[in-house]
Image (cartoon, helix red, strand yellow):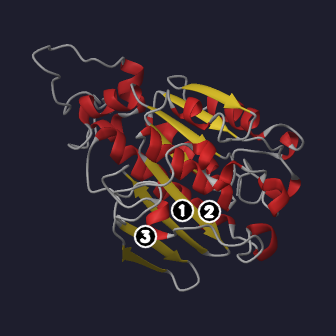
Amino acid sequence: MDGSLIDPCAHLPIYGNDTKMSLSKEQIARYSRQLILPEIGVRGQERLLASSVLIIGAGGLGCPAALYLVAAGVGRIGIMDRDAVAQSNLHRQILHGVADVGRPKSESAKARLQLLNPDVTLHAMQASLTPENALETLRDYDLVLDGSDNFPTRYLVNDACVLAGKPLVHGGVIQLRGQVLVVQPRRSACVRCVFPEPPPAGLVPNCQDAGVIGAAAGIIGSLMAQEAIKMLVGIGTPLTNRLLTFDGMAARVREVPVRRAMDCAVCGDSPTIRTLASDGLACDTHNQGASVGRSL
């Protein structure tokens, strides 16, 4: 080689009839490996920079998802988590470090992510998602990514997204297993279509009781971020009407076909859940052995 530098703009498509690039030189260098993808290009990158994502939970799923969404240049990201960082979080919640123990997770995550990409505006919310604030919280975001660790929050997020018409990337992980589903409200199966009611408290173990491998959370969180990017740019085939399951012990991934249920309580033809206040999740879930707003 002659030592000359490769021009990262050389193979990028011209935007419209304007010979000027719509991105700065710094952005072209930062996103060059995305920009050369024909599915992304300048238009796709602009869409990402103009998009917004609300992440529920800065834990095992929210942390890797947030890292990749910020790195990809999603323009505005909200991080909602009421918990503080604990020592037991550090093996999987990769935005937090030893010095962050005791610090609110949303603030710790924001501080770490700010170092990664100055293009992204970050909002830290140290709060729980509740029936009272859910619709208002979701209102200003294009897409929701649910990384919560308990069934009341997962069903609340699902119901709020359906009622608000917001796309949802749902994920879950335990031990070495996980799952991902994308919900396009009233166009594809929602979480209630697949699992109509949350299980009784204590019936299904959580990560605190059953354990979890950090790498499994990283795999599921990364898949969630990729689905979010696809939805925001409008490329590929989203994981709608397909529940992707991951078995890390057997190193096996499979899809379970699902369909929108016409009798679904929230997105069916005659829904019984029309407001969040009328849902059973509006009651005090702390008395049911669940903790709303915590992260995996």
Residue at x 41% of width, y 30% of height: 51
Question: Given this view, does label 3 or label 1 mark the residue nearer the observer?
Answer: 3
Label placed on residue 244: 3
Question: Given this view, does label 3 or label 2 mark the residue nearer the observer?
Answer: 3
Please identify the quarter of the rendering in which residue 134 is found.
top right
User: Which label's residue is closer to the chain start, 3 or 2?
Assistant: 2
Q: Reply above or below: 241 against 101.
A: below
Discs 2, 1 touching: Cβ within 8 Å? yes
Which residue type does callout 2 highlight? Ala
Query: Dot 3: few (<14), some (14–19), or many (≥20) neighbours within 10 Å?
Result: many
Instruction: From the image, tell me which residue sits under label 2.
Output: 217
Query: Dot 1: few (<14), some (14–19), or many (≥20) neighbours within 10 Å?
Result: many
How many marks are shown on the rendered structure? 3
Discs 3, 1 touching: Cβ within 8 Å? no
User: Which quarter of the rendered picture does the C terminus lie within?
Assistant: bottom right
Question: Is residue 148 in sight in this rendering?
Answer: no
Judge from the rendering whether residue 111 lies leftward or rightward of residue 190; answer left or right.
Answer: right
Label placed on residue 220: 1
